[in-house]
Amino acid sequence: MSDEPAYRSRLTLRPGPSAGPTHPRPGDVTDAEDPELARLRDAVAVPVVTSLLTARELEQLTVHHGVDGDEGDVWVRVVAAGEVFQDWLTSPVWRSLEAGAERPFTAEECAARLADHLEDWIAESRFGWGQQRSARYVLPGS
């Protein structure tokens, strides 16, 4: 029997520049430049966010087109008491079933999803730790 191994492998690692994996996130285009994003901000994000955060807590609210996700993703970004919350507001790939037919999420469904996620985030934030805030809002045109 030979002392030579049956298999030999050699691996060389060379550190170098890497962009790493990309993850969906808010992009640079915001409601300040895009009228459709401004409409979503006013119709969905503003009523929900202002029902959960005080004027003193809310520092910034912006709606963005997403990058590195599905085409048409829309994100909401909130800065409150120095902490940042960002989440999908809507995506064209999200579908609801109504009478067996697929349809895009409505403003009401987007608002309910945002409210649910923002309520959870506030309860885990430094400024709202442990608080059980409940969103009470009325969407324009409802």
Image (tube, rainbow, N blue to C red):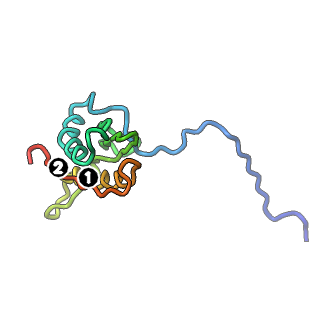
Apparent side of residue 96 relative to residue 3 in the rendered image (left or right): left
Q: Position of residue 127 (x, y in %)?
A: 37, 47
Quarter occupied by the N terminus = bottom right
Q: Residue at x 51, y 45 (%)?
A: 21
Helix, strand or loop at disc 2?
A: loop
* Amino acid type, mark 2: Tyr
What residue sits 84% from the left and 64% below the top? 5
The residue indicated by pointer 1 is 115
Q: Which mark is residue 137?
A: 2
Residue 64 x/y as whole percent: 31, 37
Which residue is the extreme one toward the top?
A: 33
User: Of residues 36 and 87, which is closer to you in this image?
Assistant: 87
Q: Are marks 2 and 1 in contact (CB under 8 Å)?
A: yes
The 10 Å Cα crowd at callout 1, few under 14, some 14 to 19, many 20 or more, is many
- In-front residue for pair 29/98: 29
Secondary element at image label 1: helix
Relative to 5, is 93 on the left or the right?
Answer: left
The image quadrant that residue 16 belongs to is top right
Image label count = 2
Residue drawn where x is 17% and y is 41% of the image: 43
Quarter of image, res 34: top left
Q: Earlier in the sequence, mark 2 or mark 1?
A: 1
Query: Height in image: 102 above or below 65?
Result: below
Dividing the picture into quadrants, the one containing residue 8 is: bottom right
**22 or 139: which is nearer to us?**
139
Residue 72 in picture, x, y percent from top left: 29, 42
In the displayed structure image, the side of residue 105 where residue 140 appears, left or right: left
- The image position of residue 71, as x and y in percent, is 33, 42
Pick the front one: 123 or 70: 123
**Residue type, numbered disc 1:** Ala
